[in-house]
Image (tube, rainbow, N blue to C red):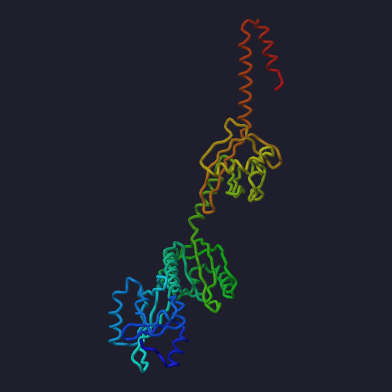
Amino acid sequence: MRQITDPIIAGLLEAAPDAMVCVDSGGQIVLVNAQAERLFGYPREELAGQPVEILVPDAAKAGHPALRAGYAATPRPRLMGAGLDLSGRRRDGTTFPAEIALSALDTGQGILVTAAIRDVTQQRQAALAQARLASIIQSSRDAVFSLDLDGLVTFWNSGAERIYGYTAAEIVGRHSDLLLPDEQRSDVHIIMATLALGVGMNEYQAQGVRKDGTAITVIVTLASIADKTGTITELSAVVRDISAEQRAGVRFRGLLEAAPDATVCVDESGRIVLVNAQAERLFGYPREELTGQPVEILVPDAAKAGHPALRAGYAAAPRPRLIGAGLDLSARRRDGTTFPAEITLSALDTDQGTLVSAAVRDVTQQRQARDNLRRINQNLAILLLLPRARPADATALAGRIQRRPD
């Protein structure tokens, strides 16, 4: 095995940032540096004199001598692995993706092939993550685009094309003011200027303008993008079109207001998020006072403690359900008085999670009518038990029954 005796060459190899492996014309390893020891897990004494194929994965070993011979025939600096799936093999048998730069080194004792080997695992992982992120961004139904600090569009995904109607070719390089109504531009400019100074993220609801001039309602999340030095170079925008949801919300509120019963909508935590005018009248609260309150504010004191468990039970298996028919359920007004109630529960799936809608009906009159009917039936039953009484006696008894206090 030929040894490298030139201290300058040896010193340069040792100072190189990459793993360096020097191979003679027979394919034997002549010299490695400390980085190669760390990368491959071999001490240099164990590598010296070994065929270089010891560092080649098993699947590529058979074809490697021919590749060496091909390079030796026309040696010149060459980068291998950029865009290729080259790998190196460690002492423990594990492999890693590699980029390899080959060069010929004339030592005065013959030509050596020097391989500078770089583990590109992190670069490959970063590239994969970047490709995955790019795929997610491009397939997102939300608009995702970026702006330079002057407000010019620099990137535009397919979701932005769907929402705003501009293709990337039409909008990239143009000012983002095209996407805003005139009256909102100055406010958005202030937000962008603030973000350019490094102040985190800003989310707001705004009006947008499509290519055809139609208005849309959007939720915008703006954030700053910094380079490696921490200098902010761009702004990113994620925009969701909520026009349909807003229209649906208006229709829902219209239906809610038109409902004949008092309706109370409660979120998953048991807090009231929406009531209609009938609920205001029935319970005596203005809706502003009810919104955000726990629904137990409408439950009589005697039933308050057990109500959260009932809510949890319904949330576990939500389905349309009438409760109160045949039961003595009650609700509580703002003034503390109570009334008998029937309640119909149903679940509504919304963007804010599942809401439970309770249609509450005051059944005071129905209960009174039921109680009156029960008393009449009881009176009739008593009369039927007196078949032999004289008419006058029966009439007197019936009169006494009717005059009996409730």
Residue ranking furthest to the bottom: 108
The front one of 305 and 178 is 305
- Residue 229 figure quarter: bottom right
Give the number of callouts: 0
* Residue 23 visible (yes or no): yes
- Residue 72 figure quarter: bottom left
Q: Position of residue 198 (x, y in %)?
A: 59, 74
Q: Where does the C terminus fall, quadrant-wise?
A: top right
Q: Identify the residue at horizontal 66%, vertical 35% (top origin).
A: 339
- Considering only vertical position in the picture, is 330 above or below 84? above
* Residue 212 visible (yes or no): no
Q: Position of residue 290 (x, y in %)?
A: 65, 48
The front one of 335 and 10 is 10
Left or right for 78, reference 364: left
Q: Identify the residue at horizontal 50%, vertical 52% (top origin).
A: 248
Q: Position of residue 147 (x, y in %)?
A: 49, 73
Q: Identify the residue at horizontal 47%, vertical 67% (top origin).
A: 144
Left or right for 191, reference 15: right
Q: Where does the N terminus fall, quadrant-wise?
A: bottom left
Q: Position of residue 194 (x, y in %)?
A: 59, 73
- Considering only vertical position in the picture, is 403 above or below 35? above
